[in-house]
Image (cartoon, coloured by chain):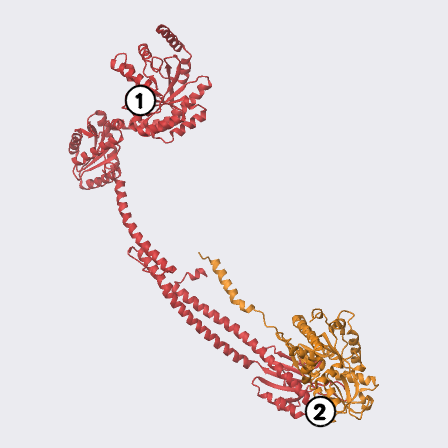
Amino acid sequence: MKRLLLQFPLRVAIPLLLLLLALVWSAYALYHDTRLEDLRIEAASRDELTQEMSSLQRVIEYLLLKGDVEGVQLAIVPLGSHPNLQYALLADDNDIIRFATRRAWIGRPVREVSPATHSDSMTRARTMLAGEVTVAQDRRSVLGYYPVVLGAKSGELRPTRTGILFILYDLEGPKQAGRRVVQRHVLQSAALMAGLSALLWLLSHFVVTRRVARIVSTAERLAAGDRAAQTGLHGRDELGRIGQAFDQMARKIEADNGRLIESKLRLEHQALHDALTNLPNRALLEDRLQQAVLTCARDNKPLALLVMDLDRFKEVNDSLGHHSGDQLLQQVALRLQNTLRKSDTVARLGGDEFAVLLPGADAERAIQAARVLITTLEAAFHLEGQMLDVRASIGIALFPAHGTDEATLLRRADVAMYAAKRAHSGYALYDSGQDQDSLLRLTLTSALTHAIEQQELVLHYQPKVAFSSGRVVSAEALVRWQRPGQGLLPPDEFIPLAERTGLIRPLTQFVLHETVRQCAAWRRAGIDLTLAVNLSARNLHEAQLAEQMVAYLEEWDVPPACLELEITESAIMTDPMRALAVLTRLDAMGVRLAIDDFGTGYSSLAYLKKLPVDTLKIDKSFVMGMAQDGNDAVIVRSTIDLAHNLGLRVVAEGVENQQTWDMLDELGCDIAQGYFLTRPLASADFMTWLGQAPLTSLRAMHSARRASSE
Amino acid sequence: MVTGGHIVRVALMLGVLALAPACAPEPEPPLRVGTNVWPGYEPLYLARDLGYLEGSPVRLVEYASATDVVRAFLNHAIEAAALTLDEALLLADLGQEPRVVLVMDFSHGADVILGHADTQRLTDLKGRRIGVESGALGAYVLTRALQQSRMSLGEVSVVPMPISEHERAFLQHEVDAVVTFEPVRTRLLKRGAVRLFDSSEIPGEIVDVLVVRRDILERQPEVVKRLLRDWFRALAYLTAHPDDVAGRMAPREGISAAEFLAALQLLRIPDLSENRRLLAGPQAGLYEPLRRLEGVMQAQRLLARKNNPDRLLDNGLLDESAP
């Protein structure tokens, strides 16, 4: 039903439904009222006949008692004029008609002339002496049977002769009249309903249908893009409110649309431009490069792509902070833009890498442009009051000589740029030989990934010995790469690579885990040592580093105090605030913290005071040089004093001979580390070393010194 | 939010509300009580006169003769009737289902056979014409009177006539005697009629009762109960104010107040407790007269079948009929 209704628009469905309702109602009323009317007529006729015959019965009995035959005739004959009476007759006890409304019937047996008369009913009326009025089976007539006592026979106290008064009433006539009345009534009410339906439809047309149509057409217009479409409906009823809500929505859509377009443009710009320098980004450069390749291929013209990288930019960032680094990049961008023509594209590829697209440029022009760029950057940059010299390395790839698609061109310009950097030549044109280096780098990266997975990395441990006791108090874990067929690789050769490629994270995890595991193993063997691990500046940006560490410590049941983390001073100064936050968190966990390579960075004393570190490690360059160089000795001495004043322990790295050892001991240094004691050892060798002479001799030496100084 | 189910419920409620007027109780159909003129029935009219029947569906239908009452009962024109016990038996004999709910009075001299001055006793009526309402009590009275005088029906000439004609027919000597009753008795005695027989000679046999159709008794018991209560209230009033009652009722009977009171003396009107005794239980006092009556009537071929008269009695309503 619902589905059927939904097939039609409201303006059809409503009147249709009303019409249907009126029709159904009329049909029902016609049927019902006709039936009621029939029943009413039957009942009324029966009642009338009962009354009529009851009185007639007594009158006739009386008249017969009197022997007044004419009287009986007078009582019966006028019945003939009754509109619904078909006939009336009085039969005697032998069923012979004595009186009737039809003269011809007198003297004839009842059943001959009146087949409607039921002999059962006549018998019943006689024996029960009671009248009976019934509706015929076909309900077209009413039949009345009334006993009439005809008078006693002689010698009979109570009369037994009983005649029958029979009257047949027609029901068809009155029923038809009644039906006509009913039909008229139903017709009238149907007409009334139809009128009301029309009125209702009219009403719904103006209140509902027309307004719904307005909403529908407005919605369609809006959907078709007419954003000014409004229903303009009024009123506080549901449709009025829908219309108003719709209008409001349409207005809001239009307003929102303006904002959307604006923000879309902004987003598009953001997507294709570098936020810092507002130069086109890599994506846009690639797009333009692709376009340019197509154009130049069509026009048979050359094209040059320059990729430029700032030398030592990392140092600027590390020493002066990101903010200064950013400023430098902005200034570089500005200079590049000012140098080039409008038709050339300058883009920032990321980090300190820039690219310049020179359509139509051949090798000669490209080299010329590279030189101009280098010259432009040679003038010192002013950063927050500091003068800064910046050198750049530029790689040049040419279309179509070096590549015919943008990916190849970019890659080759990059390769050329690395070649220029290695050669300190400022710029370099791509040469297929350069690819080897770059390939090596790629190989190393994948090999390192492989190494971490295949556990080709091993840890070596270098002991730290306390001056006061001569005992090994701690050891620094140092990672080594055991490359199959290539021997042991020192960290200097792959740590920077790991840092650049993001492999530093799994690498650090591996080292941490291995160190904790080793620590646990030694503790079980009764050797209670603090093991130190180096953290990179990149590690400080890992949110889950601390959690990871806790997990390892718990896994191996190692107290946090057995773990020491060494972070270089320059790593801390890369992002001092973050470093402070991370170190504070690590300190709260209970692990020990040490500043590594102290003296090479630019940390301020005030800042140093805030850091929750336990230990300073003096950079080995100062320690190794202190025996020969007075300046270094002074630095070492003041560093030790400084550390002690701040309540920190001091570790001297790079202790390589007795002389240095003695000097440091003299200066009150706490702990020594270096080849003088031993080089870093694999864990098994470390165990052996622990139990051997050097240590004992150290102790002896130590006691000797103490004794002599006393 | 209006759900579909909710709408259906509301529609149903509206439908029920629309139907409610159709559920209003139908008006109680009338309880028509047929009577003929007889002093023993007057308390019914007294009750109506005193306004006891107001608000009750009881309607008194005043017929000219007991025969009319019987015919009306047969024709279902009335639901209840005041008539004599023999008439009640006759109705049952004809297949009706009358139930005696009240004994209204015993006739103790009010039913008579009157003759002209030339007759002194019943035997004087041999070969004479006797006017009798043969469709009703008259037949029984005549039969009993003839029995007592050891006469047979064949020895007299029976002229059937309704009570309404008795006075005229007698005075005009169309008949030599009439089997009649009050108030015709009083009027004819005043005109010199001679009493040949009266109901005091067959005491307890002529009993006036109120019968109600069985189905009506089942359908409208409250109406009948109330009618009985009104009857006993009227009786109480009659006892308390006989003169007032006579003044009210005598004109209906066509006799003087004094004559009315005298006529009442020929009746014995049982009170509520006697009624209970007469109608209640297996030892009901009315069984004996009923059985005798039936025997007589069968012997005289006034009844066609053998009935079980016990079924005629119904005292179920009397207990609650104290006024």
Residue B168, which numbered label?
2
Chain letter matching colour orange: B
| Relative vertical location of residue A23 with respect to residue B205 in this rendering, above or below | above
| Relative vertical location of residue A707 with respect to residue B148 in this rendering, above or below | above
The residue identified by callout 1 is A492
Q: Residue at x 51, y 67 (%)?
A: B18
Chain letter for mark 2, please: B
Let me know if residue A129 appears in the view: no
The image position of residue A94, as x and y in percent, is 70, 86
Q: Are the residues under marks 2 and 1 on the same chain?
A: no
Residue B237, which numbered label?
none
Chain letter for mark 1, please: A
Q: Which of B217 and A226 is in front in this view?
A: B217
Q: What residue type is labelled 2?
A: Arg
Are the residues at dot 2 and dot 1 in contact (C-beta closer than 8 Å)? Answer: no
Q: Is mark 2 on a helix, strand or loop?
A: helix
Chain letter matching colour red: A
Which quadrant holds the N terminus of chain B?
bottom left
Image position of B286 (left or right of A360): right
Q: What residue type is labelled 1?
A: Asp
- Total marks shown come to 2
Which quadrant holds the C terminus of chain B?
bottom right
Q: Residue at x 46, y 68 (%)?
A: A21
The image position of residue A338, as x and y in percent, is 16, 36
Q: Which of A94 and A636 is in front in this view?
A: A636
Q: Distance between the residues labelled 2 and 1?
A: 161 Å
Residue that extends furthest to the top in the rendered view of this protein = A708
